[in-house]
Amino acid sequence: MAHPLTALRRAAHEVDARTPAHRDRALDGLRALALLAVPLGHWMLGGFTRDPDGTLHNASPLSALGGFAPVSWVLQMLGVFFLVGGYSSVRSLDRARARGTTYGGWLRARTVRLLRPVLGVTAVWAVLIPVLPRLGVPAGTVRTGATLVVQPLWYIAVYLGVTALTSVCLAAARRLGAWSAGLLVAVVAVVDALRYGPWAEAVPSWVGLVNILPGWLFGYQLGVLWARGRLDRRAARVLLGGGAVLFAALLLVFHYPASMVGVPGVERTNSHPPSLLVLALAAAQCGAAVLLRERLGRLLNRRPLLWLPVVVVNLSAMTVFCWHQTAMLAVAVPGAAGLGAVPGLTTAPDSLVWVAARLALLPLFAAALVGIGWFARRFDAPWTALSRPWKAVAGAGAALFTAYALGVV
């Protein structure tokens, strides 16, 4: 029997040999980094408290350990996620048009590919919601689980929305160049001034929702500009430097919250909806990504052992995105029932002991995700094996979970 390391190297070299020469490995590497930051961020910046009856409630270490807010600056990589998404969408649309596919056909195919895994996870949770209480899981824990599952899924809706605007983004890039991204920053800045300025009490609360589209479209528009050759290294340096300066000014002068994620009990947040601080961080991250592209591409071309996990993560992207919160719950719920207070799992996230224990638990969460992924991967591929009635059942289950989640969240 071959040594595990030898087998791993052989697999890496086989994958490397099968990778087309024209494959943009740097882009895949950036996508993998952005994707892995999602579960790592949720697993490290989200925790639980446990009631005497075993009910789990969401909690955040940032409530007690505010000094860890800079960790969220590293783990909040949605700017890079949307940057790569915009670049990939333009390239994909170019290939589709070369084949004679219409814009509507291209958009429909991308939408279906993204929605299949979402329908899968929501349909499964539609079954779990009535079943788990019968197995002894407290109703409050089920509500907590539904909230956690919804957290990453709403980004899919946003991503689909900005993808549908790809043709508009291309037209804006062609006519306005870099100003097409700058105008989005201006809109977010104006909305932030309205909701946080001295006149904030007179501004309706819904005004902040205006930032949802321009806030998340910013990174996507940068990706469109990049794909069209309008975002070179000089522009990337401006993004990196300008974004870093703006980020520091917003924190130190305008006193924006330091955390890039919501903190329970804190009224003002940066990401729901996105504030100008989110765009400043996205600008700096996207600038760095563009500057590192060539170096990252060379590294992944030379090191098959590094390229292998990049391929695995990209092939499992939607599984990771949709199921990582379920994986954490698959560990936490039985732990709460059978073991009670477990440091880093079901104890309050309010100390360095919790941080150390949570770091030790990350491999267990990852193992649970791998196990769930083995089951859930069937949702990523076309549902050719499912008959039309089963597809209807899955759709109905997804609708039921959505209705439940809206009531909970």
Image (spheres, rainbow, N blue to C red):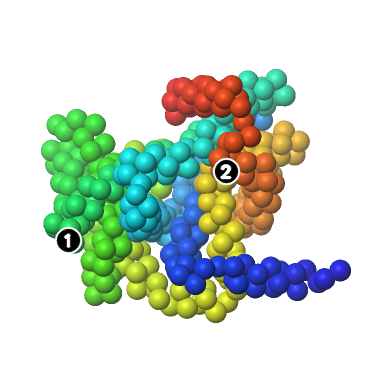
Depth order, front residue of 35/75 = 35
Residue 365 placement, left or right of 249: right
Depth order, front residue of 213/334 = 213
At 46% from the left edge and 74% from the top edge, which residue is drawn? 297
Mark 2, secondary structure of its residue: loop
Rendering coords of residue 348 (x, y %): 58, 43
Which of the 4 quarters of the picture holds residue 313? Answer: bottom right
Rendering coords of residue 190 (x, y %): 15, 46
Up-down: is 5 above or below 103?
below
Q: Which mark is residue 355?
A: none
Residue under label 2, please give it: 381
Mark 1, secondary structure of its residue: loop
Depth order, front residue of 59/318 = 318
Residue under label 1, please give it: 177
Residue 347 placement, left or right of 247: right
* Residue at the extreme right of the image, as rendered: 1
At 59% from the left edge and 36% from the top edge, which residue is drawn? 384
At 40% from the left edge and 76% from the top edge, which residue is drawn? 294
Q: Quadrant of the N terminus?
A: bottom right
Up-down: is 117 above or below 220?
above
What is the three-letter code of the residue carrying label 2? Ala
At 71% from the left edge and 72% from the top edge, which residue is drawn? 10
Mark 2 neighbour density, 10 Å: few (under 14) some (14–19) many (20 or more): few
Depth order, front residue of 344/247 = 247
Up-down: is 6 above or below 43?
below
Q: Earlier in the sequence, mark 2 or mark 1?
A: 1
Whether residues under marks 2 and 1 lie with C-beta atoms below 8 angstroms apart, the answer is no
Residue 221 placement, left or right of 50: left
